[in-house]
Image (spheres, helix red, strand yellow):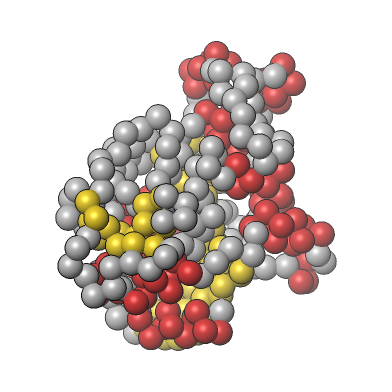
Amino acid sequence: MSKGQRNEGFSFPLVRFAADWRVLSDTRFQLVRLNNGICSVRSLVDEETFHPVVGPVAEAQALYVNQLQLRQRLLRHAGEFVIWDVGLGAAANTLTVLKATRDIPCRLRILSFDRTGEPLEFALTNARDLGYFGGYEDRVRDFLGARRVAFEDGPQTVNWEFHHGDFPSLVSAQVAAAKAQRWPAPHAVLFDAYSPARNPVMWTLPLFSNLFGLLDSQRPCALSTYSRSTILRVTLLLAGFYVGAGHATGEKEETTIASNDPAMIVEPLGPRWLERAARSHSAEPMTDPVYRTEPLSDSSMARLRAHPQFA
């Protein structure tokens, strides 16, 4: 469920494979240079390139740091600020967040989720060429070894945890657990899974409903993701979120932001979007982890119309 190329009707520039790095590739991953000259990681097993258009830092900065207004929120936040990093991959998202907020007096608790730490292990070996580790190499090494690391970076205090496993299963277990045993509810969610066609288990209505159920109604939380698909936005709305159009990033004219608090949505989806969703041939949420496209059912449309966002 780590980062990868997203095929949602957009065309991406072809990557140029690197030929001059110290560790070019192993049997699982390869360093590649994007058309803008930035280096990224390619999974040979999945045939996916992480952050394939603008590169790791630019995408993470636009999609998560800026869109979730992390600096602004941390500057006025008291106490621990919790981030769920869904799709650890090669850790570009988390490391970009840490670097972007390291001058702010704050306490960050980051929960990263992935089925494997292998992309990050490869990235760490090639940290100099990737260019986004920024002095966190030793922290990442400790994080991989112990699956957690705690440190202070100037005025910033960080507790970073690696929750290894299948995210939907981990979330289901949390829903069933007693509240005292649950993870801390997030203030922000960085949702960066492979595309629904590639990894449908990460985009189902049951998953997002469970995720929404783990939020704290007294703790405003915003979730950002690269997709702008109708099926995703319908899924988020039916799971309970308020949903809006997000900032452009790379070749994507829009992304998506969702929240349990409507005040956090700057450009909420409105009646015109609802009309387009009703005409879409790919809008009905997936209830099982099998990718398919269907128009909205009558029951889903009725639930959308009853959502407070469209009242």
> Residue at left 40%, top 46%?
5
Seen at 24% across and 55% down, the residue is: 17
Q: Mark yes or no: residue 205 visible.
A: no
- Is residue 292 shown left or right of residue 105? right
| Residue 111 seen anywhere in this rendered image of the structure | yes
Foreground: 69 or 91? Answer: 91
Furthest residue in direction front, as rendered? 27
Name which residue lies at 47% across and 85% down: 142
Judging depth in this view, the residue of 141 and 238 nearest the camera is 141
Question: Which image quadrant: the N terminus?
Answer: bottom right
Side (left or right) of 170 relative to 13 = right
Looking at the rendered structure, the number of numbered marks drawn on it comes to 0
Q: Position of residue 72 (x, y in %)?
A: 38, 60
Residue beneath the point at 51% across and 76% down: 160
Quadrant containing the C terminus in the rendered view: top right
In the image, residue 75 lies at what x, y percent? 39, 66
Q: Position of residue 288 (x, y in %)?
A: 71, 38
From this view, report whether residue 300 is shown above or below residue 94: above
Looking at the image, residue 42 lies above or below residue 309: below
Q: Nearer the viewer, residue 217 or 169?
A: 169
Relative side of 76 to 128, left or right: right
Image coords of residue 246 (percent x, y) = 41, 40
